[in-house]
Amino acid sequence: MINAIAIDDEPLAINVIETFCKDVKFINLQRSFTKPTEALKYLRKFPVDLIFLDIKMPTMSGLNLLKAVQQNTMVIFTTAFSDYAAESYELNAIDYLLKPINPNRFTQAVNKAQEYFNYIHKTNIESQKDIFIRADFSLIKVPLADILYIESLGDYLKVNIKDRKTVVARMTMKEIAEILPSKDFIRVHRSYILPVSKIQSVRNKIIYTAEKEIPIGNTYAEDILNIFKDKF
């Protein structure tokens, strides 16, 4: 069960969120607030999993409220303005719903929250089947089995995925390595991480996959040799 609150200075908007939440079995909407300062006091005493949060409010913006919340809380922004999408992305929002909120979009947003909630509460990273990557102003679910290779581009990563558009995310190789199961993925170069299952052969410091030939970095050669010495 995901414990949630709603914050919006418009009572009608609060009513909409409350009505939608009644139809979602995994959302427990504990409280609703029309005053952001009261909501902030509540959050400091009673942490929640998810906040439905309006952005443009008279006494305190939703963006500033979220920055003041000293906890890792999922947030779905609800707003009549599209201008804040980029900043909400920087604050790691689960989704961004424009008013008037479409019921189908609401369902899509809370389903995304449920998937991410289940993902972050898994205790065994080695048994996971998916990862979530923030890119293109959204949270993207990527099945591990579909990753072909990951390439570093300075402050960004290109996650090449089978039969899907490449995901470009602002992440470091260290950050993505921490969320990948180590038994299934290996760093072979300062600029490349590969799924072990996608490696077809290794020859002359080159790894061959069905999609690409990838160089082996000197720093990673011994690790690769230890994994594949019995295979190649």
Image: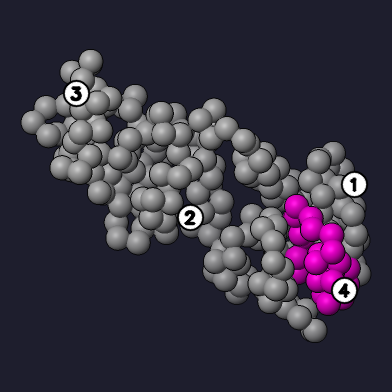
Q: Does residue 97 show up?
A: no
Query: Amino acid type of disc 2?
Result: Ala
Residue most toward the left?
204
Find numbered disc 2 in the image and state the secondary structure of the residue it sits on. Answer: strand
**Residue picked out by circle 4:** 38
Tell me how far mark 3 sits from mark 4, CA to CA: 61 Å
| Rendered residue at 53%/59% (across/down) | 137
Is 36 contained in the magenta span?
yes
Find numbered disc 3 in the image and state the secondary structure of the residue it sits on. Answer: strand
**Residue picked out by circle 3:** 201
Q: Tag 4: Cα neighbours inside 10 Å, few (<14), some, or many (≥20)?
A: few
| Rendered residue at 40%/29% (across/down) | 184
Image location of residue 171, percent across then percent down: 42, 56
Give the mark nearer the N terminus: 2 vs 4: 4
Query: Amino acid type of disc 1?
Result: Lys
Chain part drawn in magenta: 33-55
Front-lying residue, 219 or 106: 219
Tell me how far mark 2 sits from mark 4, CA to CA: 33 Å
Find numbered disc 1 in the image and state the secondary structure of the residue it sits on. Answer: helix
**Residue picked out by circle 1:** 22
Q: Nearer the viewer, mark 3 or mark 2?
A: 3
Q: Tag 3: Cα neighbours inside 10 Å, few (<14), some, or many (≥20)?
A: some
Q: Quadrant of residue 227?
A: top left
